[in-house]
Image: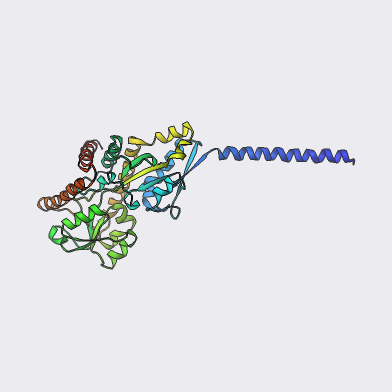
Amino acid sequence: MSITTNFTRLTGKLGALALAGAVSFGLGSAAQAETLIKFATALSADSGLMKVAYGPWIDELNERAKGEFRVQAFPPPFANAVNVWNRVVDGVADMGIVVLPPTGLPFTGSHVTTVPGTGDNVVAGSVALWKLYEKGLLKGEYDDVKLLNLVTVPANVFISKTEVDSMDDVKGMKVRANDKNSAAALTNLGASPIAIPFSEAYQALSKGVVQGGVANGVTIVGFKLGEVTGYQVDNVFFGMVPAAFVMNKDFYDGLSDEAKKILESVSGLEGSIDNGMRQRAYDESNRAYLEADKNYHFVTLSDVEKAKWDAALAKVADQWAAETPNGAEILRVYTEEYKKAAAQY
């Protein structure tokens, strides 16, 4: 066989390999054209809230994206409740759900939702919080991100190891507080609030370090606090924790117009309502679970006793309004928007 023939065959093989490589590279490039959006969350993949609320929201967003982008959840240790905000702002994550109080950052206006006695309708709370942003009453709080949605998580209630049906039962009781507002409310009720990290709440209740505290269905069921308490005051509410869906500004600016359009379709007021609905559905499932537990009891305060608790909680609202910049106006508008939304949702 001649050298020329061998050379022809060799170059033919190389050409085929090059063509195959080019095709392979082309397919790889097509696959890579789908932008990956890293979604930071402090929740594990198997958490109830992730399965019922945030996970389905991500799935719906990916369905709308149709290959334009794909959102993928990055749970701990990629991020935690304290650093999710910074992860997004710094570009380590592209997007995230941030529960605001644990960050320690000054979301002073947004914390109006944590004021005790402001309501327990999670959809109305989400709408009212977005309306505050829309009306410019949360100045500076979200300047470092592209804000997509605002949502409140289900309302906090008082839980305890022994039955509580009056303020007298609470007096002197050592209880765990969630934040400054809940601590003030518990103090006004006559209890002795103690700051205990959430990660230690189950153990503190189990060992009797505290006899009660404030929590919601997410924590009572998901983190098994119901197992070490057993009683819940059912008609007084200690505010709702605010959370935000946010995206890194530069990352958002670099997206295609089509990708931005898709994100906008699940953002703003409608997106906040949608997420509020998901939170409500999760809360209802937790409620049903607790109602089926024969060892867990719901206590409804009498009208006279409830009036006493409401009066104690109202002092916290007055204090918050006085101490927060433009607090009186923020509280007024939030309350007004909440009532309108509650009548609709």
Position above or below: 208 against 345: below
Q: Nearer the viewer, residue 29 or 56?
A: 29
Q: Where is residue 158 shown, x and y percent of the image?
A: 22, 55
Q: Where is residue 26 shown, x and y percent of the image?
A: 63, 37
* Residue 230 picture quarter: bottom left
* Residue 53 picture quarter: top left
Query: How does the figure colour the protein chain or chains?
Result: rainbow
The structure residue drawn at horizontal position 16% and vertical position 48%, both measured from the top left corner, is 314
- In this picture, residue 307 sits left or right of residue 296: left
Q: Nearer the viewer, residue 291 or 230?
A: 230
Q: Nearer the viewer, residue 74 or 164?
A: 74
- In this picture, residue 253 sits left or right of residue 149: right
* Residue 179 picture quarter: bottom left
Q: Where does the N terminus fall, quadrant-wise?
A: top right
- In this picture, residue 263 sits left or right of residue 117: right
Q: Where is residue 262 shown, x and y percent of the image?
A: 43, 34
Label count reads: 0
Instruction: Return the residue found at the far bottom.
Output: 207
The structure residue drawn at horizontal position 32% and vertical position 45%, both measured from the top left corner, is 279
Q: Where is residue 256 shown, x and y percent of the image?
A: 49, 33
Position above or below: 182 against 22: below
Instruction: Return the residue found at the far left.
Output: 304
Q: Nearer the viewer, residue 92 or 139?
A: 139
Q: Where does the C terminus fall, quadrant-wise?
A: top left
